[in-house]
């Protein structure tokens, strides 16, 4: 089995890259483990989950809220979970975020591990130890940074992933390419979704490449003092519109990346041909690139953004494809750009 070892905050974390359900049984003591998953995964893999003590949460971002945490905690108490219990989150980003969050607070912290099952969670959400939940429309407003014991990849879970969720995953893959890896961008331009889905080694290579991009950034800056902020490319406006317009995360981020590219053109001399290339690539992977927004409402949400410091929002802009920077933009200037350009 291919695995990589990482050290975060002085603690080891393993990533098992080409594992399967048998590996899971070897790694985890079933008697001490409680699985957390969502209703879609539970329905798609009934045999697998029948073998584990499992808490099932309702699927969907709308449930990434405190009420779901309360319900999980009640069930943990009923199942007599103690400090030695391992919480194993098996699902998309909602499940991996929630599992990390509950593990961080239950009995002041128990161990957890993750098996991401959506493309997006595999290449992004499960990696990096950020575990947050939403408060009303405010995305990931509360949470903590805490690493799992391990992350395990079993690509066979992807067989049940709906097509639109594959597409959402590509938004984050394209984000990685935009901020760090022009070669990945060019590779994505040359291939397409169907080819990747139908060629296992191409898919495995793409997933491994994106795991490497994210883990490298997080390793250098676990607590988001510098480079980790670049991963927020497309997310400042993306998060603002995601819950306001009930968009899938990937769609919101796709539109957010285009808007951030427009701001990059305005502030940062990002070339307009490069922006067109980005729009084309997003379309090529069936992602939306525009939406009619209520500018005032979106701007009001931006004022609450975690990246706002005093009167500036710390925006992630592109210098060119493959190279991003953190740029503080005064709220007044941003309001102007919003009203005149976006
Ligand atoms: N913590 C982080 O660093 C981080 C990074 C990126 C995104 N996120 C969070 O991740 C979430 C988005 O992740 P997501 O797109 O995976 O969301 P999700 O968990 O809602 O999964 C998307 C949908 O796919 C279904 N699904 C997942 N895997 C499946 C499978 N193998 N078979 C069948 N159905 C499956 C889910 O039930 C859900 O309906 C957001 O809440 C976002 O804020 C967190
Ligand atoms: Zn994201």
Image (cartoon, helix red, strand yellow):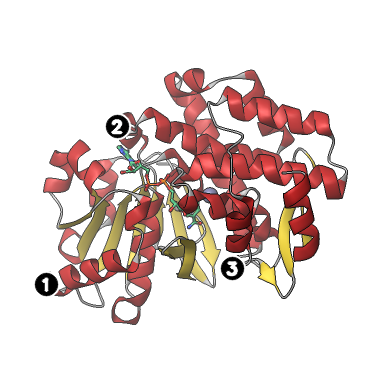
Task: Indicate the secondary structure of the residue bearing disc 1.
Answer: helix
Mark 1 lies on residue: 78
Residue 164, percent from left and from top: 41, 31
Q: Do the numbered discs 3 and 2 sit on residues whose CB atoms are within 8 Å?
A: no
Q: Is residue 41 above or below residue 216?
A: above
Circle 3 — which element? Answer: loop
- Which residue is painted at 22% across and 47% down in the image? 39
Percent x, y for residue 300?
60, 62
Using the rendered image of the protein, determine whether residue 130 is visible from the camera's viewpoint. Answer: no
Q: Which disc is residue 160 wearing?
A: 2
Which residue corresponds to the image point at 79% horizontal and 55% vertical from the top-left?
A: 336
CB under 8 Å between discs 2 and 1: no
Q: Earlier in the sequence, mark 3 or mark 2?
A: 2
Q: Dot 3, how many residues are within 10 Å of its Cα: few (below 14), some (14-19), or many (20+)? A: some
Q: Quadrant of residue 248?
A: top left
Report which residue position mark 3 lands on.
304
For image coordinates 48% across by 52% down, the residue present is 244
Q: Would you say residue 303 is visible in this rendering?
A: yes
Q: Earlier in the sequence, mark 3 or mark 1?
A: 1
**What distance separates the C-alpha of mark 3 from that of mark 1?**
37 Å
Q: Nearer the viewer, mark 3 or mark 1?
A: 3
**Quarter holding residue 135:** bottom left
Q: What's the mark number on residue 47?
A: none
Percent coordinates x, y for residue 98 in the rendering: 35, 61
Queried on whether the Cβ of the residue with tag 2 lies below 8 angstroms from ligand 1, the answer reads yes
Residue nearest the viewer, comparing 219 with 180: 180
Residue sitting farthest toward the bottom = 108
In this rendered view, identify the residue nearer to me: 27 or 149: 149
Label 2 secondary element = helix
Q: Residues within 10 Å of mark 1 (few under 14, many from 20)?
A: few
């Amino acid at each position: 089995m291919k695995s990589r070892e990482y050290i975060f905050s002085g603690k080891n974390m393993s990533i098992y890259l080409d594992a399967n359900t048998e590996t899971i049984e070897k790694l985890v003591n079933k008697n001490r483990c409680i699985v957390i998953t969502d209703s879609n995964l539970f329905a798609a893999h009934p045999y697998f989950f029948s073998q584990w003590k499992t808490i099932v949460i309702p699927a969907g971002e709308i449930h990434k809220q405190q009420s779901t945490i309360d319900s999980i905690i009640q069930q943990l108490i009923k199942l007599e979970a103690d400090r030695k219990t391992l919480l194993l989150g098996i699902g998309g980003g909602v499940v991996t975020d929630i599992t990390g969050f509950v593990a961080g607070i239950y009995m002041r912290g128990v161990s957890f591990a993750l098996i991401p099952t959506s493309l997006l969670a595999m290449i992004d959400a499960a990696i990096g130890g950020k575990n947050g939940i939403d408060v009303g429309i405010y995305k990931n407003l509360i949470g903590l940074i805490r690493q799992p014991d391990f992350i395990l990849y079993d690509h066979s879970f992807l067989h049940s992933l709906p097509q639109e969720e594959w597409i959402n995953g590509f938004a984050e893959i394209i984000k990685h390419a935009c901020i760090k890896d022009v070669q990945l961008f060019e590779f994505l331009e040359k291939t397409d979704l169907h080819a990747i889905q139908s060629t296992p080694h191409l898919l495995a290579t793409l997933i491994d490449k994106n795991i490497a991009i994210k883990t490298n950034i997080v390793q250098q800056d676990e607590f988001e003092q510098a480079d980790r902020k670049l991963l927020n490319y497309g997310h400042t406006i993306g998060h603002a519109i995601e819950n306001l317009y009930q968009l899938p995360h990937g769609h919101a981020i796709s539109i957010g990346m285009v808007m951030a590219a427009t701001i990059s053109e305005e502030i940062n001399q990002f070339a307009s041909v490069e922006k067109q290339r980005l729009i084309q690539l997003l379309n090529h992977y069936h992602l939306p690139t525009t939406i009619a927004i209520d500018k005032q409402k979106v701007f009001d949400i931006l004022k609450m953004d975690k990246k706002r410091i005093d009167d500036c929002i710390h925006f992630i802009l592109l210098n060119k494809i493959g190279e991003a920077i953190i740029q503080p933009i005064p709220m007044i200037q941003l309001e102007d750009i919003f009203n005149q350009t976006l």
